[in-house]
Amino acid sequence: MKTDPKLPDEKGKFGVYGGRYVSETLMPALIELESAYIEIRDDPKFKAELEYYLRNYAGRPTPLYHARRMSEELGGAKIYLKREDLAHTGAHKINNTLGQALLASRMKKPRIIAETGAGQHGVATATVCALLDIECEIFMGVEDTARQASNVLRMKLLGARVREVNSGTRTLKDAMNEAMRDWITNVRTTFYIIGSVAGPHPYPMMVRDFQSVIGIESRAQILEIEDRLPDILMACVGGGSNAMGLFYPFIDDSGVEMVGVEAAGLGLESGKHSASIAMGKPGVLHGSKTYILQDAWGQVLGAHSIAPGLDYPGVGPEHSFLKDSGRVNYTSVTDTEALDAFRFLSETEGIIPALESSHALAAAIKSAPEMTRDSIMIICLSGRGDKDIQSVAKILEYDSHTP
Amino acid sequence: MSRIEHKFKELNQTGKAALIAFLTAGDPRVDLTVDLCLKLEESGADIIELGVPFSDPMADGPTIQAASERSHRGGTTMSDVLSIIAKIRVRSEIPIITFGYYNPFFAYGHGEFAADAAGAGADGLLVVDLPPEEAEEFKSHTDKAGLDFIFLLAPTSTEERIALVAQKASGFIYLVSVTGVTGARPALDFSLEALTNKIRAYSGLPVGVGFGVSTPEQAEKISRFADAVIVGSALVNIIEKHSSVERVLLCKVGEFIKGLSCGCYKSESTKN
Ligand SMILES: Cc1ncc(COP(=O)(O)O)c(C=O)c1O
C-alpha cells in the first residue's frame, strides 16, 4: 500500500491522527514555527549548512554494516546494521537536534529547551547548543536522571542546565509536560526542540524529515552494496523518530516490509509496558491525536520499559496512521528479550547497543532465522549502549569482579 | 437565553463584573465539591468553572497540578463531575462550566458528553488544549445540546486568531492574563486592557480575564475594563490548605470569595 506523500495535510493530520491540540498561548508559536520550517526546508543555503554539520560534525554518513557473525549465528536473513550509534553523541538524535537548532538560530531564538528520557536527546540538544552558542535547559524525570546518570553529567559538561522533574510518573511523559509548561511561559524567546516524531504539528513532520537522512543513506548504501532493495526494515519505536527516519524513504517501495518494535516491558498482559500501538487506544496527548495508553476515562497511564527512551505512553501520530493503513507492522519485545539481545550483539559483533535499539535487535533475533539466506534485513542501531552499562550491570548483578 | 448570557445581562445592570470561580472537581472529595460550589455562590461567585482532573495538566502550574493529582488519585471520573453538576443544579441556578483537557472528553465521546452534560445541567465547557481549529466536530454536538463553547485567547494571540476565536466562541471569551501556566501571581500584565479592547472590536461577547488573580485589588483593576474576573489557583490554594476540617474550609473559602466579589463592582467613575 502506498501512502500519500503529501501527508501531513495542511492541518497537520496523518489521516485522523496528528493535528495541533495545544492551548491558545502556543498556537501562534506553532504557526510561526511551521512557516519558518517550510521556508527553510527547501532553501539551498539552509540545506547546505545542515549537510555541512551532518558530515563534518556528526560524522555522517554512518556505515551500513554487514553483521556477519550475527547473521551466521541466527542462520537466516543477511543482516545489516545502520550504525547510528557511530553518529556524534552516540545516537540518531543528533540528526534532528542539528536541524532544529539551526532553525532556532535562523529564528533568532536565544534559548532552547528539550525533554529527554534516555538522555540521548538531551545530550544531542546540549551538544548543538554548545556548538551554536545558545542557552540550553533540559527537562528529565528523576527516575531517568538516576538510571542514565552518565548522560546527566554529559549534559552538564556541555553547559546545559538539567531540570529534574518530580511530578507524575517522573519519566519521559512528565519531562515533556514540564518542557511544555516552560514553553508556554517563555514562548517568545524559547525554541522547544522535541526529540521524537511526537507533539503538535509541525513537529512530527519536521522531525521525520530531519531523521529521514537515516533511510536516504541506507537506501543508497544497500543499492550500492547489494544492488537491490532490502526485504525488511526493523527499528524500535519509542516516540518513533529513528523508525520514521529509516522507514520514510522506503515507504513507496512496496516490496520492502517494515517492522516497528515497541517495548513490552514485563509483558503485555502485565500492564507494565510501553506498547502504545499494541495496547493503546486513539486519544490526545502532548498536542497530537495518536495511540495512547489510557484508562476507560481518558486518563493517561504510566508506561514501563527497561529502556528509558521507550518508556512513553504515546507514539508519533504518523505511526498510528501507518499502523491503521497496514503499511508498517508493529510488534513488541519484553525487557528480558531486549537484555538478551543487548548481550548477544555485544558478544557476537563487539558492539554494545543502546537498550532502546536492543528492542529492534530482539525482534530481529526472532524473525531473521525464519527468513531465507538470500533475504536482506536492515536494523536501525539507533544508539550505543555506554549509557546503559551501569543499569544493565545492576540488573544482571555484574560488577567488575564478575569473571 | 442561556444561563451564562442571562447572568452577564443581570450583572451588567448592577454594574458588577462576573466573578468566575475555578475549582477542581473531586478536590479534596467528590461530595465536598457540591458544598464548596454552593458556598462559592452564597459568597458572591457568579459562575463556576468545574475542573475535570487529568493525568497530564500541561498548561497548569504547581497548584492546580497538585489539585488535579489529588482528585485523580481519588478516582474522580467524568461521570463524577457530571453528577456533581446534577446535584448542584437541584439546589442552584448558578451557571456551571466544565473546564479541562481534551482526552477525558474525547474518551467519554463527543455526543455522549454533550447529552449528559446538558442533562446534568451544565451550561458550557472550556477545553484547554482544543483550539478552534480542532474543535469543530465536538462543538457541533455541544451546540446542539445548547452548551456554550468557551475559547481562550492569550497575550500571544495574533489579530488573525482573535478574529477566528471571535467567530467560533459562545458564552464569553476567556482572556488568559499572562504568557504562562496557571498560578497565583503578585502582579498582572498592564497591556490587558488594550488586548481586551482589541477583542471587543471583533466580538460582542463578554470578556473574562483570568490566570494569576488572587486579590480584591486585582479584581478591582480587571473589573474596570473586563466583564468577568476569573480566579483559580488562589482559591485552590485555600482549598488545599484547609481541606482537613470541613467547617473551616467552607468558612475560609467564603471569606476569600466575599472579598474578591466586592472587588468586582465597577467603580463609579467607569460605570456607564
Ligand atoms: C538510542 C535511542 N534509540 C531510540 C530512542 C527512542 O526514540 P525514537 O523512537 O524517537 O527513535 C531513543 C530515545 O531516547 C534512544 O536514545
Image (cartoon, helix red, strand yellow):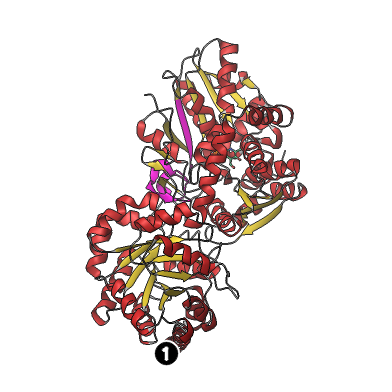
Magenta segment includes B105? no
Quarter of the image where the C terminus of chain A is located: top right
Q: Residue at x 66, y 57 (%)?
A: A163
Which of these two is toward me, A46 or A273? A46
Q: Residue at x 50, y 58 (%)?
A: B58
Residue B43 visible in image = yes
Q: Magenta part of the protein: which range?
A: A258-286
Q: Disc 1 is attached to a residue of which chain?
A: B
Quarter of the image where the N terminus of chain A is located: top left
Q: Is residue B10 left or right of residue A346?
A: left
What amino acid type should be assigned to the residue bearing mark 1? Arg
Residue A241, by quadrant, is: top right
Question: Is residue A171 shown above or below B210?
Answer: above
Q: Is residue A121 left or right of residue A243?
A: right
Residue A344 x %, y % = 60, 30
Question: Is residue B32 shown above or below A283?
Answer: below
Residue B199, by quadrant, is: bottom left
Question: Is residue B139 shown above or below A89?
Answer: below
Q: Residue at x 61, y 37 (%)?
A: A96
Q: Which residue is mark 1?
A: B247
Residue A399 x %, y % = 71, 45
Magenta segment includes A279? yes
Residue A91 x %, y % = 64, 35
